[in-house]
Amino acid sequence: MGSSVGQKERAILSAHLARHHLKRSGQREAILEVFLRCERHLSVDELLRRVQRKRRDVGRTTVYRTLKLFQEAGLARELVLDGENRYEPAHDREHHDHLICQGCSAILEFTSPEIERLQEQVAAAHGFEVQGHRHQIYGYCRDCAAKRRKALSRRAGLS
Amino acid sequence: MGSSVGQKERAILSAHLARHHLKRSGQREAILEVFLRCERHLSVDELLRRVQRKRRDVGRTTVYRTLKLFQEAGLARELVLDGENRYEPAHDREHHDHLICQGCSAILEFTSPEIERLQEQVAAAHGFEVQGHRHQIYGYCRDCAAKRRKALSRRAGLS
DNA sequence: ATGGTTGCAAAGTCTTTGCAACTAT
DNA sequence: ATAGTTGCAAAGACTTTGCAACCAT
């Protein structure tokens, strides 16, 4: 195990490297490995820490450079959550989007084939060829919404 | 004219200021004015420059602080386009989302009531109270898609 | 051998904070 | 008078770049 994960992604990376006359390296392999392994969205820092657990000789700079490389190869996608830059595998088996709570910063995930279908329609109407998307709904989760309602009615009662 | 624009937004800001025991200021008014005036998404820098044309005594710091204030008041929304932090009025008469070209960085806008409706359903299913959303579809615009297809078939022909 | 890759330290961005002067209430 | 606001300069956080050593091809 380990090396059996991400066969396809490895191939994509190899192809990209070959096409651009770039080289393999232990660091790149290690980063890819870790990156694909964790489904969650990682910050540069988290990724760095995890990679370093496996291989001490990986610098922060390399993580930045490698993430850029992954993006160019179409393997990674950058997203901003709660003001933080994060990254996720682009060939996500099943793509998901986010519900972000403005109260407690919780992040719920959702998928909606219907929305994806509508997106394609919208894009087609503009002659646009879709590569991916990013869809964030922000507001208040069940708990925070309840708290807010309470706070609001309390205020209303006072005035 | 000028002062007639953004009546509602002024009211919202006033209410927010009052509720939080904050004060009015010429700078805040000027920034709001300019911010509402331009429909496009502005970077902090652009906003600063435009505001300074009207009022020299506005510092960059104040723009940052005021944008944060606007966000808290629900008047502004932050978004990341092409790696750049930008802001747009949140009470946008009609909310729009973006199609972003990875080739030429063009940004097309779209609206889709159907998608908005589905969003509400998704949110409701999670007990989530929607305040807003951000939906970016990225890929290639008509022209760039055509160029890419050409480039790809050329390569295929060569190999 | 050639030319891409790496880590480090330095330089760059963009954003926030400390502070004294200023201003709305 | 009191308490929030401002601009500036300094500090911070995050990212990129210059460079000499290193490594894949």
Image (cartoon, coloured by chain):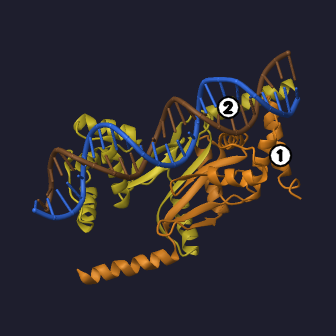
Chain colours: A yellow, B orange, C blue, D brown
Q: Nearer the viewer, mark 1 or mark 2?
A: 1
Q: Chain of mark 2?
A: A
Above or below for A70 versus B28: below
Q: Position of residue B24 (x, y in %)?
A: 82, 37
Distance from the alpha carbon under mark 1 to that under mark 2? 28 Å
What residue is pinned by disc 2?
A: A146
For the residue marked with disc 2, what is the amino acid? Ala
A152 vs B117, left or right, is right
A96 vs B2, left or right, is left
Name which residue lies at 58% across and 74% down: A125
A25 vs A85, left or right, is left
Residue A61: quarter of image: top left
Q: Secondary structure at mark 2?
A: helix
What residue is pinned by disc 1?
A: B10
Above or below for A33 versus A24: above
Most foreground residue, B104 or B108? B104
Q: In the picture, which quadrant includes the N terminus of chain A?
A: top left
Q: Position of residue A33 (x, y in %)?
A: 26, 47
Q: Is residue A80 visible?
A: yes
Q: Secondary structure at mark 1?
A: helix
Q: Chain of mark 1?
A: B
- The lab-note entry on whether marks 1 and 2 share a chain reads no
Most foreground residue, B65 or B105? B65
Q: In the picture, which quadrant includes the C terminus of chain A?
A: top right
Q: Position of residue A110 (x, y in %)?
A: 51, 48
For the residue marked with disc 1, what is the amino acid? Arg
Q: Residues within 10 Å of mark 1 (few under 14, many from 20)?
A: some
A65 vs D9, left or right, is left
Q: Position of residue B122 (x, y in %)?
A: 58, 49
